[in-house]
């Protein structure tokens, strides 16, 4: 790659490489599968090979300067990092300032876990309330550049909300397939409000994805599920943001929930690329946490070391990660191996408890996101995370996505109904204060 210190480095051209057989191709079929072996593809940038070290250092500066910029592509927490993204013309970029999410220090939880530095990267603070926006922004821009009118996805809810919103912004039409009765109401409402064609199928998420596989062969809609490798390019930028927010001090651990396993794969890809380009020297251990009732990767790692997927019939109230046949399992297993992370599962009770604790710290998140804290507690207990180490938890979705869960769990007591007079209120408060 050519570098001139006075101008911005250009985005590199990319190719698609199979994560299994390594075959390379410049374009993909409608399901984004390897033409040789049918496995998933990943985006690689051959021009990075042998890139000079000053390229990396210059990038840090450019990215910092852009944070104060007013252009849409500079204000975006995704497109601000465009040197490490597929090239796309400005006019095709669909952006809503995605990314730019806070890294919140968790002091109370850190105290309880006896950790010196614990942070939550709150991706629920994205435009539609989940991390999906970072990936959808890139993938839908590719769809627009290719002239598609329709985009589509199968979803446990968040992807559908994001796809619907970004399609609306791009004046495209969106089609979302949802497992009937298994999507949190906040997410369903979003997809409807943003104007998607919402189709509820009598199956689970894995079933929806199977149906969509056939639909896209026969209907001209661009697939925005995470088999689409451009999704991961957007989602990997969370690693860049975390590093900026930690002033380029690499944390010891990043802990992330896993469902279809693209987010953990993207996170790992982001950190690996930073190291490849010399922006960081070490890698954090990336640990992936699943619900015990939806733990195909945990079983895959335990039972065969990550060589062959063990499918499960998924069941969990953390509906976002109710997935038994995850598409990106091979990529995620690769991230576990290359970063030395752990793969754990947590019970429904542990998720509910962790979620309540995050709420009590004023942070809050949706159930699937809380799996990361539940998993961290396990990893601290087992000694995998040590008492001197810095940890970043990835919180993937906003608390208000799944209000029914919170009300059903009755984690917090609600008092009343009671008479609407000050005396009743004060008497109640005094009783509470006295510990009765
Ligand atoms: N957390 C939340 C809030 C999610 O919505 C998802 C996935 C995950 C974690 C897991 O991420 O699949 O990349 O491992 N939701 C998808 C959806 C499946 O359709 O919204 P993953």
Image: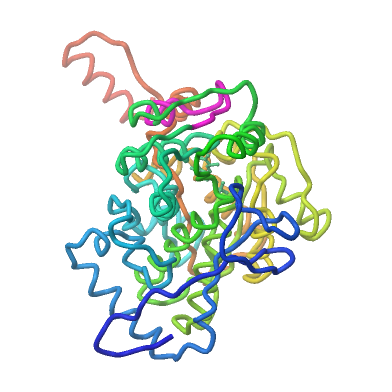
Q: Is residue 180 rendered magenta in the image?
A: yes
Quadrant (top left, top right, bottom left, bottom right) of the C terminus: top left
Q: Horizontally, is 404 left or right of 129 in the view? A: right
Q: Nearer the viewer, residue 82 or 407?
A: 82
Along the viewing direction, whichever of 332 and 30 lies nearer the viewer = 30
Q: In this rendering, is residue 411 above or below 392?
A: above
Residue 349 on the magenta segment: no
Q: Quadrant of residue 171?
A: top left
For residue 318, what is the image quadrant?
A: top right
The answer to whether residue 428 is visible is yes
**Considering the image in quadrants, where does the N terminus appear?**
bottom left
Considering every residue shown, the one lying at the far right of the view is: 304
Query: Can you say whether 37 is above or below 396 in the image?
Result: below
Where residue 354 sits in the image (x, y, percent)? 51, 43
Q: Specify the segment rendered in magenta.
A: 176-190
Colour basis: rainbow
């Amino acid at each position: 790659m050519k570098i001139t210190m006075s101008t911005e480095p250009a985005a590199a051209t990319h190719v698609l490489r199979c994560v299994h057989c390594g075959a390379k191709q410049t374009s993909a079929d409608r399901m984004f599968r390897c033409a040789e072996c049918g496995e998933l593809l990943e985006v690689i940038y051959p021009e990075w090979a042998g890139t000079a070290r000053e390229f990396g250092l210059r990038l840090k500066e450019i990215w910092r300067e852009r944070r104060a910029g007013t252009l849409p592509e500079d204000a975006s927490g995704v497109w601000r990092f465009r040197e490490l993204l597929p090239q796309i013309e400005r006019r095709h970029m669909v952006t809503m300032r995605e990314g730019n999410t806070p890294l919140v220090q968790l002091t109370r939880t850190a105290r309880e876990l006896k950790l010196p530095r614990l942070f939550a990267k709150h991706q629920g603070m994205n435009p539609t309330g989940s991390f999906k926006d970072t990936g959808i922004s890139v993938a839908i821009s590719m769809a627009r550049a290719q002239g598609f009118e329709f985009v589509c996805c199968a979803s446990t809810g968040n992807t559908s909300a994001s796809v619907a919103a970004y399609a609306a912004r791009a004046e495209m039409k969106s089609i979302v397939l949802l497992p009937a009765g298994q999507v949190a109401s906040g997410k369903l409402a979003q997809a409807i409000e943003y104007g998607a064609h919402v189709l509820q199928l009598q199956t689970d998420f894995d079933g929806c994805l199977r149906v969509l596989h056939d639909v896209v062969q026969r209907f001209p809609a661009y697939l925005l599920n995470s088999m689409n490798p451009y999704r991961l390019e957007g989602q990997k930028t969370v690693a860049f943001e975390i590093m900026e927010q930690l002033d380029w001090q690499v944390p010891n651990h990043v802990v992330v929930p896993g469902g279809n396993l693209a987010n953990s794969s993207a996170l790992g890809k982001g950190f690996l690329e930073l190291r490849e380009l010399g922006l960081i020297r070490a890698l954090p251990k990336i640990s992936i946490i699943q619900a015990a009732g939806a733990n195909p990767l945990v079983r895959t790692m335990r039972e065969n070391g990550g060589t062959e997927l063990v499918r499960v019939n998924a069941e969990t109230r953390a509906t976002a990660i109710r997935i038994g046949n995850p598409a990106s399992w091979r990529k995620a297993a690769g991230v576990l191996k290359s970063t030395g992370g752990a793969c754990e599962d947590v019970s429904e009770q542990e998720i509910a408890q962790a979620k309540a604790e995050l709420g009590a710290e004023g942070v809050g998140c949706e159930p699937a996101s809380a799996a990361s804290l539940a998993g961290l507690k396990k990893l601290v207990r087992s000694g995998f995370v040590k008492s001197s180490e810095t940890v970043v938890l990835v919180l993937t979705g906003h608390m208000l996505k799944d209000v029914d869960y919170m009300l059903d769990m009755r984690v917090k007591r609600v008092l009343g109904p009671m008479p609407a007079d000050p005396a009743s209120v004060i008497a109640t408060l005094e009783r509470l204060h006295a510990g009765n």
